[in-house]
Image (cartoon, rainbow, N blue to C red):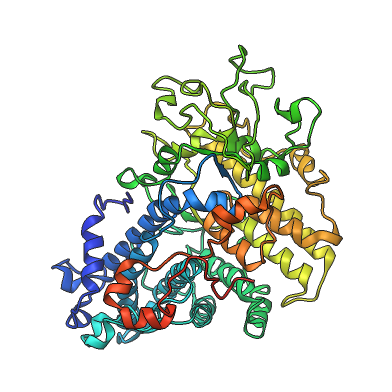
Amino acid sequence: MLKHHNIKHWKGAMALTVLVASILASCTKNFQKENAPYSGPASATLAQLYTGIGSNIDLDANIGKNAAARWLYPITQLGAVYAVSDFTFIEGTSWSEFYSNLPAMNQMLHTMATSPDSATYTNAIAMVKVLRAYQAIELTNLYGDMPYSKAGKAFSGSTKDLVVPYDKQQQIYLSCLSDLTWAVNHFTTAAGQYSFPNEFLIGAGGSSGPIPQWIKFANSLRLRYALTMYDKDNADAAPIIADAMTKPLLTDPVLDVIGLNQTNIPGISFDISAAGRGFFFRQESRARMGSTLWNLFNTNKPNNNGTDGSGIFDLRCRIFFEVNGDTAGTVGVDTSGHVKGKWVPYPQNPVTPIADGGDPYNTKRDPSNQGWSSNKAGNLYSDYNYYWGRDGIMSGSTGACPEIFMSAAEVHFLKAEAYARGIGVAQNTASAQTEYEAGVTASLTFWKNMAYNSSVWVVNKPTSATPTAGEISAVLTNPKVAFNASNALSLIYAQEWIDLFRQPWVAWTLMRRTGGATPADTNNPAGYAQNYGTLQRYQYPADERQFNNTNWTAATGGNDLTSTKIWITK
């Protein structure tokens, strides 16, 4: 659970945020500046509300997104499962946490904008707008149309603000992009600006403070979302893309990865109530490395299709996954320091499900318990790297991979797409190649850095934080990766998809908005279609049908189907 500086518990702040959503019209006049004493929910300070927003975003990132991953990995083919999940294809955490945040965000914006000294709140207003836009668009990418423009305003005191209509996804995109543009154009490094004392996302920043990075984050989101909607509304998207390409974007492969991390939030846990990233691996013990991703990491070899790892040319393979439990009497490490076992991908879409054994995500594999090699007996297929379920969770863990919102690598791939397609900029194959190769390099750098700096990483730990020139060249020159103008978009989407390994919900958006142009196994398409191919969105939470039925019916036509394609889908 998040801990901002000396704030030990978030539950009070979370409850506060929820209370703001009730009809407390008198709250507005009682908002105080950060240094005023806390005197109860009705007089919540801006800092306390901001902390509550962070708490709910944390719950969304850790619980909601990791719970969704059990379906989204096989849907996007970033991973495989040897049996379809026992858990229903349903999502509720992201929805509830956003609508817990929205009233607080809206009231904060209203309070700051109408304050006599509103000019001192420019940066704070921009930060809240960025967070609201990020949460709103990521949520609408899961559901489609949803309440937005009239939602989260119960603080007004009007009962008409309690049950509100659904906005079309296009309108949500345009509204949020307008907010992001406002933020990019109004963030200021001038003195005298109010600042939240408990900044959870970007932290202190450099010599100019956090504002330059906030600008880069907001502008990078503009690029992501404008490209996402381009094929549905190019008239509105193209000018935004053109403008975003001229303004600061995330560039540093490590420092410009935005998300929830231990640097900004001392004491953060990535397994809130035992339901975060560790929960995904413990509960989804059937998750395995799939053949789709394996085929992009491995050059096929005659010796058992490279099961000895000799064909692996991409360092991310050994960071994302690990060998199976088939040691065949060769327990230990080889001369390269790699654990012995076999690299065997699970067939992405087998005609007949193939069972697998072992218990590869059992925490008894911790060094302080039975050790790395335990619980692998009978494990025939390569697993997700055990450390992903323990990173940031094991006692004393440091240097953990953040819960990622956006990375510099993704920005490079977005720019590569813009140049390759001539969207917002003149079509330029050379620039597309430059950005593509920069994206691959940034991705290799980030993931190697994560494994190197994570204190829980022991077996197969990289010996340096950055990739060597040889490691980068091995990837960029491999025929499966080397830039080729004739299939540039396929290459760009493939490498962007790989980099989204720990963001399968973003990869799902990429897959849908490109019309399925992300990597996919061509074997048994009928099996994939039956198990995953019809899943286009989540159903709305049951409360919507019960308590907002008129508007729910207007939005769904009375048929809330997971097979209904959302607006951004190509």
Residue at 56% from the left image edge and 23% from the top image edge = 325
> In the visual, does 189 lie left or right of 30?
right
Kindly tell me whether residue 89 is visible in this rendering.
Answer: yes
Please provide percent x and percent y for residue 6. Answer: 27, 51
Does 311 sit above or below residue 226? above
Q: Position of residue 393 (x, y in %)?
A: 39, 38
Q: How many marks?
A: 0
Frontmost residue, 219 versus 393: 393
Query: Eyeballing the image, is 371 above or below 218?
Result: above
Residue drawn where x is 54% and y is 72% of the image: 566
Q: Residue at x 48, y 81 (%)?
A: 168
In this rendered view, identify the residue nearer to me: 9 or 512.
512
Considering the image in quadrants, where does the C terminus appear?
A: bottom right
Name the spot of residue 290 as percent of width and height, x first: 62, 41
User: In the rendered view, does 197 fall on the left or right side of 516?
Assistant: left
Please state the horizontal and vertical placement of residue 537, each as a whole percent of the image.
50, 65
In this rendering, the answer to whether 458 lies above or below 3 is above
In the displayed structure, does residue 489 sit left or right of residue 46? right
Residue 499 visible at all = no
Farthest residue, direction left: 39
- What residue is at 51 percent from the left and 60 percent from the top? 207
| Location of residue 34 (image quadrant) | bottom left
